[in-house]
Image (tube, coloured by chain):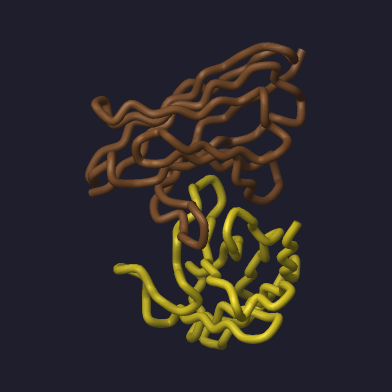
């Protein structure tokens, strides 16, 4: 059974940093592009970033470029999102998802972790 | 930037057919994926590449895509189908449609 389990969310002040983690199991993690997708409270889905199987390619939505960094550790079957210079508008549930590159779907999703940016 | 337009809400009686549309410029030439999201839960892929169904998704769910509109069709709607539905093309999502079962 595929499982994606996010952690690391919480309350952080504007300008602060947070690192999200996603532990994957039940599939060959190293064979998949991986993505982060977020959902602001009461709003729709927004793709945030994705990373190639070997980490050699990374892409970001414009609103987080220069502030967020996606990374992965295939030996640990883990995906990460380092979030710096956080803003109120980054407040959202952050989902880890497999796939999501080019025309591919987001096959599997984690349960999400809530990030709240507020003073 | 590519924009996907969905109706905010669709209502249907149990046992009837619900159709949720996703509009986009020449969307028929692109691959469309659909997700179901129930309150407090993560999205679940219900249709991929326009009309394919992942394992475990009922045959009542189907999809089509042509011209400027992609459509998710749910036949014989059940109370458990009440959820938000999102279409996706590349890295873009539609705004979502809330399906209400009357």
x, y percent for residue B54? 35, 68
Instruction: Report which quarter residue A41 is drawn in.
Output: top right
Name above or below for residue B32 compared with residue B64.
above
Say which quarter of the image contains residue B89: bottom right
- Left or right: residue B23 versus residue A96 is right
Q: Quadrant of the C terminus of chain A?
A: top right
Q: Farthest residue toward the front? A: A56
Q: Is residue A46 left or right of residue A34?
A: right
The image shows residue A111 at horizontal and vertical percentages of: 44, 40
Image x and y of residue B7, in percent: 75, 70
What residue is rendered at 60% in x and 62% in y? Answer: B86
| Total marks in image | 0
In the rendered structure, the answer to whether residue A39 lies left or right of residue A56 reads right
Q: Residue at x 66, y 40 (%)?
A: A61
| Pick the front one: B101 or B85 | B85
The chain that appears brown in the image is A
> Who's the residue at 73% across and 35% down the image?
A63
Q: Position of residue B46 (x, y in %)?
A: 45, 67
Q: Is residue A71 above or below residue B90?
A: above
Q: Residue at x 74, y 74 (%)?
A: B25
Q: Colour of chain B?
A: yellow
Query: In this rendering, is residue A103 above or below A10?
Result: below
Q: Nearer the viewer, residue B89 or A38?
A: B89
Q: Between A100 and A40, which is closer to the camera in this rendering?
A: A100
């Amino acid at each position: 059974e595929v499982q994606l389990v996010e952690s690391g969310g919480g309350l952080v002040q504007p300008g602060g940093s947070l690192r999200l983690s996603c532990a994957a199991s039940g599939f060959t993690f190293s064979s998949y592009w991986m993505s982060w997708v977020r959902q602001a409270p009461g709003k729709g889905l927004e793709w945030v970033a994705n990373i190639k199987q070997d980490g050699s390619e990374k892409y970001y939505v414009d609103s987080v470029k220069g502030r967020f960094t996606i990374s992965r550790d295939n030996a640990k079957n883990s995906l990460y999102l380092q979030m710096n210079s956080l803003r109120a508008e980054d407040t959202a549930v952050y989902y880890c998802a497999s796939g999501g590159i080019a025309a591919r779907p987001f096959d599997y999703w984690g349960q999400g972790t809530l990030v709240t940016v507020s003073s | 930037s590519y924009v996907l337009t969905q109706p905010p809400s669709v209502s249907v009686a149990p046992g009837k057919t619900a159709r949720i549309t996703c509009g986009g410029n020449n969307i028929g030439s692109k691959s469309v994926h659909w997700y179901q999201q129930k309150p407090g839960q993560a999205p679940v892929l219900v249709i991929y590449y326009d009309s394919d169904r992942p394992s475990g998704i009922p045959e009542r769910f189907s999809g089509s895509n042509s011209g400027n509109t992609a459509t998710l069709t749910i036949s014989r709607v059940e109370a458990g189908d009440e959820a938000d539905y999102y279409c996706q093309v590349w890295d873009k999502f539609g705004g979502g449609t809330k399906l209400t079962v009357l």
